[in-house]
Amino acid sequence: MSDALSALLDKAVFKHHIIGVLADLILGGISHIQYADDTVTMIDGSIQSVVNLRLIQYCFEWLSGLKINYNKSDVYGFGMDQGEECLANMLNYKLGAWPLKYLGIPIAESRLGSSAFNHIKQKMVKKLDPWKGKHLSAGGKLVLTNFCLSSLPIYTMGFYLLPKGFHHEMDSVRGNFFWQGAQDVFKYHMASWITLSRPKDQGGLGIINTQIMNECLLTKWIWKIHQQPDEVWYKLLKAKYMRHKSFFKSHSRGAS
């Protein structure tokens, strides 16, 4: 059924009944993105687009027999000085607040700070039940640190270059657990975290260096860009940063 809604929105954009965002970069603009049964609709915020979008939603409900869950629907405005609450009322949605989370990824209308990723550190702390640190040997804590705590930020690091300060905060959580367990009793750290993060053949313990891993995970996007896929995200990046040049000659100034 999501394909049917997508077809209705595409037809409305083609007929200029609704106007998507970033129409100056992509022909027709971006009107919606979908994943499974979730749909994110993006319009220019004009009264005409909002009214027509509401009509499309009514038509979709009538044709499909499905009902939109308005309790889980929010409106987020960006680039608007006022009028967001009015648009939310017209659509019968709640007015959301930035940053939002979509598929587990924080999204904001401006550059994200370290506080937007605090949920990762909170997950790491929740993993550390007191009994785990109390009854585990040094080898057990090493395995738990490397394969459980270090894996929690992997998904987010595949999309964002996390601030260095936040990497230090994660290192602090992992280091405290490795040396003193999940208890609050202070114990001296017998080696620096940089030393422990070295490969075993270089005198370390092979603990994942999240900062290096973050950079490695982001390099996969260079290969995806090189493949020039026929997808919206690539068209947007090419139109904004690589209009007449390759990725390696593009400038990151002004990037979000």
Image (tube, rainbow, N blue to C red):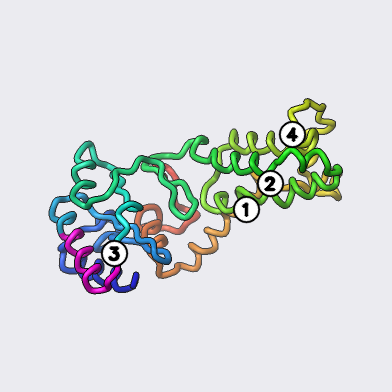
| Between marks 1 and 3 in the image, the one whose residue lies nearer the viewer | 3
Residue beneath label 1, please?
Answer: 216
- Is residue 56 part of the magenta span, yes or no? yes
Q: Amino acid at mark 3?
A: Lys
Task: Specify few, some or many for label 3: CA neighbours under 10 Å numbering under 14, 14-19, or 20 or more.
Answer: few
Q: Is residue 103 magenta?
A: no
Going by the numbered disc 2, the residue's amino acid type is: Leu
Q: Is 98 situated left or right of 62 in this image?
A: right
Q: Nearer the viewer, mark 3 or mark 2?
A: 3
Q: Alpha-carbon distance for marks 3 and 2?
A: 40 Å
**Residue name at image x 19 percent, y 40 percent:** 83
The answer to whether the residue labelled 1 contacts the one labelled 3, judged by CB atoms less than 8 Å apart, is no
The residues tagged by marks 4 and 3 sit, at their Cα atoms, a distance apart of: 49 Å
The mark found on residue 80 in the picture is none
Residue topped by disc 4 = 176
Counting residues from the start of the chain, the first of labels 2 and 4 encountered is 2
Whichever of callouts 2 and 1 sits on the residue coming sooner in the sequence is 2
Where is residue 121, by image quadrant?
Answer: top right
* Badge 4 density bin: few <14, some 14–19, many ≥20, Cα 10 Å: some
Three-letter code for the amino acid on which mark 1 is drawn: Cys
The foreground one among 128 and 171 is 128
Write the start and end of the magenta stretch as one range: 52-66
Task: Say whether marks 2 and 4 touch (CB < 8 Å).
Answer: no
Q: Earlier in the sequence, mark 1 or mark 3?
A: 3
Horizontal placement of 120 versus 116: left or right? Answer: right
